[in-house]
Image: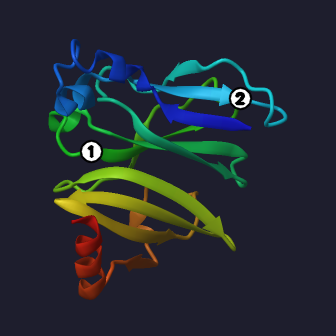
């Protein structure tokens, strides 16, 4: 069993190192993910940091993981800003691992150039994979994307269906968030 988390040690530097600036945290925060492991869900290892992002990445946020049965490895994905767009809008990146010690070079899983993608989750049901992405457009906006498989994880052109909430649902969401 594995728990992945954002390296929250960055919060200790909020006043000094990051000058109360979330933009600065996003650009200069931790390039690592915190990892704990357990064989029995009772006894856990000490936290260790796995540096997955290089210096081109901003802070790695909101990690999630799914097991890919076909490739027999794990797909770890997270939100981050990146130097390629001057640390602007965040995208979802991913890396693969078999042991949570060695990770493949990060690649883009999903991006929307006009808006931050601040969170994501991948789910499998009956052989289809679903990507839930949370996009920040003034308020929070969700979208489900169905993919045929993780074989073509970078080829999101193979979308089957994109779900967007109706205008009425968006208005209700705005009322709830106000």
Q: Earlier in the sequence, mark 1 or mark 2?
A: 2
Quarter of the image with the N terminus in it: top right
The residue that disc 2 covers is 37
Instruction: State the separation of the CA atoms marked 1 and 2.
Output: 28 Å
- Above or below, 162 against 44 in this view is below
The residue that disc 1 covers is 90
Q: Residue at x 23, y 13 (%)?
A: 17
Circle 1 sits in a helix, a strand or a loop, which is it? loop
- Side (left or right) of 138 relative to 29: left
- Above or below, 30 against 126 in this view is above
Whether residue 52 is visible: yes
Q: Quadrant of residue 70?
A: bottom right
Q: Residue at x 29, y 29 (%)?
A: 58
Quarter of the image with the C terminus in it: bottom left
Circle 2 sits in a helix, a strand or a loop, which is it? strand
- Above or below, 110 against 129 in this view is above
Q: Residue at x 31, y 29 (%)?
A: 57
Q: Nearer the viewer, residue 34 or 101?
A: 34
Q: Residue at x 68, y 43 (%)?
A: 73
Labels 1, 2: front one: 2
- Above or below, 173 against 105 in this view is below
Coordinates of residue 22 in the picture (x, y in percent): 21, 32
Q: Nearer the viewer, residue 17 or 51?
A: 17
Q: Badges 1 and 2: C-beta atoms under 8 Å apart?
A: no
- Side (left or right) of 100 relative to 23: right
Q: Quadrant of residue 156?
A: bottom left
Coordinates of residue 15 in the picture (x, y in percent): 22, 17
Coordinates of residue 124 in the picture (x, y in percent): 63, 65
Q: Quadrant of residue 61?
A: top left
């Amino acid at each position: 069993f594995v728990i992945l988390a954002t390296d929250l040690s960055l919060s200790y530097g909020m006043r000094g190192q990051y000058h109360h600036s979330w933009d600065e945290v996003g650009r200069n925060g931790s390039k690592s993910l915190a990892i704990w492991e357990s064989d029995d869900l009772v006894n856990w290892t000490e936290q260790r940091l796995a540096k997955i992002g290089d210096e081109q990445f901003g802070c790695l946020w909101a990690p999630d993981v799914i097991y890919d049965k076909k490739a027999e490895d794990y797909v770890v994905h997270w939100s981050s800003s990146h130097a390629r767009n001057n640390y602007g809008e965040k995208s979802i990146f991913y890396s693969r691992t078999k042991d949570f010690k060695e990770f493949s070079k990060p690649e883009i899983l999903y991006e929307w150039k006009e808006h931050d993608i601040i969170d994501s989750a991948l789910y499998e049901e009956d052989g289809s994979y679903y990507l839930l992405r949370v996009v920040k457009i003034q308020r929070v906006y969700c979208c489900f994307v169905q993919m045929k498989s993780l074989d073509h994880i970078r080829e999101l052109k193979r979308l089957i269906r994109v779900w967007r909430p109706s205008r009425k649902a968006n208005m209700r969401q705005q009322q709830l968030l106000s």
